[in-house]
Amino acid sequence: MGVTIKDVADYAHVAVSTVSRVINNMDRVSPETRKAVNDAIEELGYVRNNLAASIKTGKSHFIVAVVPDIRNEFYTSVIRGVESVASKEGYYTLVYTTAEAVSREQNVFDGEFSQIVDGIILTPSQTDDLMYKKSGKPIVIVDREIPGSDMYSVCVDNYKGITLLMEELIRNGHRKIAIVSGPLMFNIGIDRMNGYMDTMKQYHIPIKKKYIRTGEWFEEDGYHLTNQLLQLKDPPTAILATNNLLCIGCAECLCDRGMVIGKDISLVGFDDSVMAKYLGPGITCVRRATNEMGEIGAKMLLALLNKQKEHFPQRKVILDVELVKRGSVVKLE
């Protein structure tokens, strides 16, 4: 028979309830007592029975990160940030991908799956937050904001990121600037498109609809939208891709057409990536905190789970961005 919680209590000379409080990371335990219990756990080799604990406490110590896909290195980085924080607090992180499909996302909230997790880190696929709120689970949204929602969220300054890219292109003489974007549903689409439009207006550059292309957020969309731009009678001199996968698709199309990025055409992108760093001559981009977004999202979720909302008096956290200059912008005379 294995070591029991009573064995730990006897060894540490405390009550069983005290050991339980330490194991479940609860308050009202002095640092000295907590250390004595943890020392006893280590000395005796006690292994917590999470299943039995979840039945008794109603907590599974599982959280789930719901993201559109894991092809995108941005989301894998966010997940790493979530896991790094959650694991330190005794939580296990599950990952569920939606492929941007509302029906797949609903499986998380409507099915039995939601019953086995304590909380959810969510990159939403729909703009109606009613289903999320009806779930009764603590939820923190990352990357995207639902328009008009008061849900807890962590995102970045998307508008600023696009204006930084646009001003870099304009400083280098570009006026025929195209934008390749995903759907204009969430802040990541709306704010980035607004940044493009407002900067064009600020610098008195005519906005041409033919240079505005929208699709989904994946490589194949970047590829075929870029192909459309290159077939115009008056093609752009610069393309702004509004996420890293779109940027990869744009670069692939340009290369397939025999064009040299940074010489024949300029390409800039929102989100840094391995491709942006190492594809010659390197893609000028906007870098944002990715691991940190996951870390803050996890801390926010744990505060909700532990009924410590006062740790996050502001429901929305907006992280800053920075411009990373590389060699993909042609200087026009």
Image: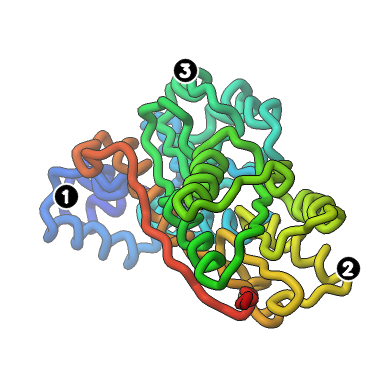
Residue position for label 2: 257
The C terminus: image quadrant: bottom right
| Residue 38 shown left or right of residue 13 in the figure | right
| Residue 38 shown left or right of residue 99 in the figure | left
Residue 319, compared with residue 208, is above or below; it is below
Residue 49 position, x and y percent, is 45, 45
Q: Nearer the viewer, mark 1 or mark 2?
A: 2
Q: For marks 1 and 2, give the CA distance.
A: 73 Å
Residue 146 position, x and y percent, is 48, 31
Nearest the viewer among 159 and 134 is 159
Residue 76 position, x and y percent, is 59, 58
Three-letter amino acid code at the position of disc 3: Lys
- Dot 2: what SS? loop
Which residue occupies 50% across, 51% down?
Answer: 204
- Dot 1: what SS? loop
Residue position for label 1: 14
Residue position for label 3: 134
Does the rendering let one see residue 5?
Answer: no
Which residue occupies 24% across, 36% down?
Answer: 309
**Colour theme:** rainbow
Three-letter amino acid code at the position of disc 2: Arg
- Dot 3: what SS? helix
The answer to which of marks 3 and 1 sits earlier in the sequence is 1
- Bin the neighbour count of mark 2 within 10 Å (Cα to Cα): few under 14, some 14-19, many 20 and up: few
